[in-house]
Image: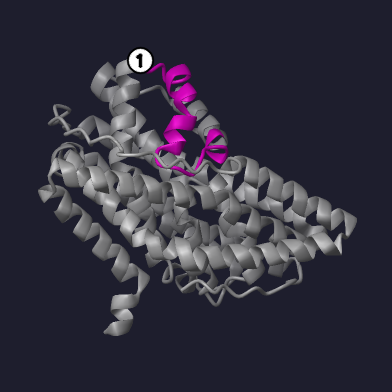
Amino acid sequence: MKKLLNSLPFRLLLGIVVGVLLGQVFPLGAMKVVVTLQYIMGQLITFCVPLIVIGFIAPSITRLGKNASRLLGVAIVIAYTSSVCAAFMSTGAGYALIPHLSIDTEVAGLRELPEVVFELNVPQIMSVMSALVLSVLVGLAATWTNSKLTCDLLGEFQNIVLSVVSKIIIPILPFYIAATFCNLSYEGMITHQLPAFIQIILIVMAGHYIWLAVLYLLAGAYSGKNPWEVLRHYGPAYLTAVGTMSSAATLAVALDCARKSKVLRKDMVSFGIPLFANIHLCGSVLTEVFFCMTISKILYGELPGVGTMILFCVLLGIFAIGAPGVPGGTVMASLGLITGVLMFDDAGTALMLAIFALQDSFGTACNITGDGALTLMLTGYVEKHHIQENGNLESPIL
């Protein structure tokens, strides 16, 4: 019983429940404190994300040696393929289901959250995408030059980052998630706006689970390993993603979940999980495509043409690779496509942002959970091509 109470999944679920309940009863004065605390914790978590990316990807690339460039290319190809195929599946579902849906767009207004009492800004040392590019360049350059000193330094930096994650990030996550759900509950997002679009949200969630099943079955078939041995460890990562709505904020927990799997190679986990957290957004892409088609039907009376949707999906997969791993990152990165390809006006764009926010947490959870399947594919690839494992760093998290 004590082990259950101290487990991360229990603490995350408790944070969600407590947050929703407190949001219904807290007065304005108490919400000022909650909003401020969430802001400060969010700043701290966001600050650490580039450090986590550098601390895992760069050392992992140095351990891959001469195979680093090839594996990076393979990872990008399977991440893009997953996102685009998920988008095409969502498009097919949209043409089949949306004409038969009855959706009430008249939703109740939200209460405004109070302003942050004081802003403790903790800017990142660099953007997440900059950290990703720097990690790849430094890792590849250290490999090409056989720089043992740099490789050793990167390994030590990885140990430091793991310590920060285990002693700071993981302990504050339940409180951050509780504050997030408290804010959503106070606004009325959960009680008022969510029911209005419950049909499409349930359809999209079903799409997430179908696509995750496809990814894990394909990964298991290709690698020859049991995909359940990966998926069964992903509960904490899924709940964290639901609570934070951010792939970046969930990265630390996702790393730990993947490292518990007996079928994933440890070097592929350290290399793949941080990389896929930034470039593999299958759930968010699937969500955005279906919502865009729904809004087109609601506001403009018809669904976009097949050719238009194919172009949108192909380009969206590219934009998703560069999207920030923050709440709403995918839709923000692709606003140019929404207005330029689908020709949405201001009303369509505003509605897209609003309903995407309702479902963003589950899309993010799909992204994170799908990363485990892609890492299993990478494990299968290196084993089939007889790429030896170099280094075996155990995670001290939890």
Instruction: Please give left or right for residue 49 compared with residue 385 in the image.
Output: left
Q: Residue at x 43, y 64 (%)?
A: 170
Q: Quadrant of residue 287?
A: top left
- Position of 125 relative to 20 (above/below): above
Point 72% across, 61% down: residue: 154
The N terminus sits in image quarter: bottom left
Residue 175 shown in magenta: no
> Is residue 61 toward the left or the right of residue 302 in the image?
right
Q: Residue furthest right?
A: 145
User: In this picture, which residue range is highlighted in magenta?
Assistant: 319-345
Examine the image and state in which quarter residue 296 appears: top left
140 relative to 37 in the view: left or right: right
For the residue pair 156 and 137, the one nearer the viewer reads as 156
Horizontal side of 199 relative to 229 (left or right) equals: left
Q: How is the image coloured?
A: one colour
Nearest to the observer: residue 136 or residue 296: 136
Residue drawn at point x = 61 percent, y = 58 percent: 272
Residue 330: horizontal and vertical position, in percent?
Answer: 46, 37
Q: Farthest front residue?
A: 118
- Name above or below for residue 255 compared with residue 201: below
User: Which amino acid lies under the numbered mark 1 shown in the image of this protein?
Assistant: Asp
Binning the other alpha carbons within 10 Å of mark 1 as few (below 14), some (14 to 19) or many (20 upward) gives few
Q: Residue at x 28, y 44 (%)?
A: 35
Q: Secondary structure at mark 1?
A: loop
- Using the image as rendered, state which of residue 158 and residue 346 is in the foreground: 158
Q: Position of residue 127 (x, y in %)?
A: 58, 40
Q: Is residue 153 above or below residue 341?
A: below
- Using the rendered image of the protein, determine whether residue 274 is visible from the camera's viewpoint: yes
Residue occupied by mark 1: 345
